[in-house]
Image (spheres, helix red, strand yellow):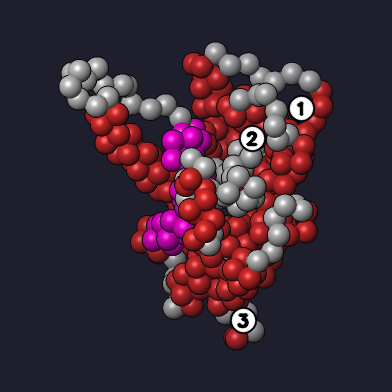
Amino acid sequence: MSSAASPPPAPAAASPARPRSPRRVIGWRVRFAALSLIWGFSFLFIKVGTDSFAPFQVTFGRLLFGTAVIAVALVWKRERLPRGLRTWGHLAVAAFLLNALPFSLFAYSELTIPSTLAGICNATSPLWGMLLSFVALSEDRPTRRRVAGVGIGFLGVLTVLGAWQGFSGLDVTGTAMALLASLSYPVGWIYVRRTLAGGSHSHLSLTGTQLLLATAQLAVVTPLFTTMPTSFPVWPLLSVVVLGALGTGLAILLQYGVVAEVGPTIGAMVTYFIPVIATAAGVTLLGEPLSWNTPVGAVVILAGAALTQSRPRKSRKRATEDGGAPGADRKDLTATPPPVPAPVNS
């Protein structure tokens, strides 16, 4: 969220905009790269964490440490949590749909499927979002470009799953959990748009409350379905800490910083890097197997997702003339971040 300190005032003969522009461009690119790496490695951290801890315990830990990071940011910026029972009620639902449920499902899925497959399933969120927006959001009308993107994307899903082989060798339950987790994100986005859009609260304030409520939900559920660990191995414990502090806390701050600086369209492009990094990390560091259909299907999925978010040339030109980033349609679910974080896998 924070940007680099402003440089000293330029001499009177120089344009004041030129010294700041290069620093700003380098800044957001570095943060974008860091965000892609953090979210890409999140699936590896989940896999390592679930080697020694129950999935609910991994989810509770990541939410706990992620909330701690956001709490520090709130104190630093001297922001308060929102007031009003209605707002907290909507945030509790958002916390379940955008954090507690998908985080838990991904953790459970990686008990039986590779982290590479979980990362690729996560990339289907824009496709689910586009399908749901056609039904739930009247302003998001289907176009041939978007429909084609959804069709291509789900063709990629079938390629990853090896549909022509009858899904042989595939753990159906684990894969279904990962896909359901990816579906949970756009359901949460739509709920947020319908209930919390247009409010006066800051992103950081809503984010902090949402993560706090998600942590409380897991604090109730975890003791009911798990027992206290008898040991805390270093690497699994460190993975959970990093998953929460970086993958949930810091990543959210980076996400909003990038979106605020360069717009939601470029910010949403992080989706295309996550499965690539997740696959590379799983294969090289965890030794997970990789068949040809997995990377090929992932490319097809990303191509379909990109097509659903693309805009005709006229729309891009109009957006630029209106002062926005090319393709930044403020009514588009998949390109516009809601007032509460809708992380890809934060």
Q: Residues within 10 Å of mark 1 (few under 14, many from 20)?
A: some
Instruction: Provide the residue span drawn in magenta.
Output: 253-282
Indicate whether 119 appears above or below 223.
below
Residue 237 at x, y = what percent?
A: 49, 39
Disc number lying in front (2 or 1): 2
Indicate whether 293 appears above or below 9.
below
Provide the residue designation for mark 1: 88
Q: What amino acid is at disc 3?
A: Ala
Provide the residue designation for mark 2: 339
Provide the residue designation for mark 3: 163
| Residue drawn where x is 63% and y is 16% of the image | 80
64 vs 226, left or right, is: left
Q: CA distance from mark 1 to mark 3?
A: 43 Å
Q: Nearer the viewer, residue 277 or 5?
A: 5
Q: Residue most toward the top?
A: 78
Q: Secondary structure at mark 3?
A: helix
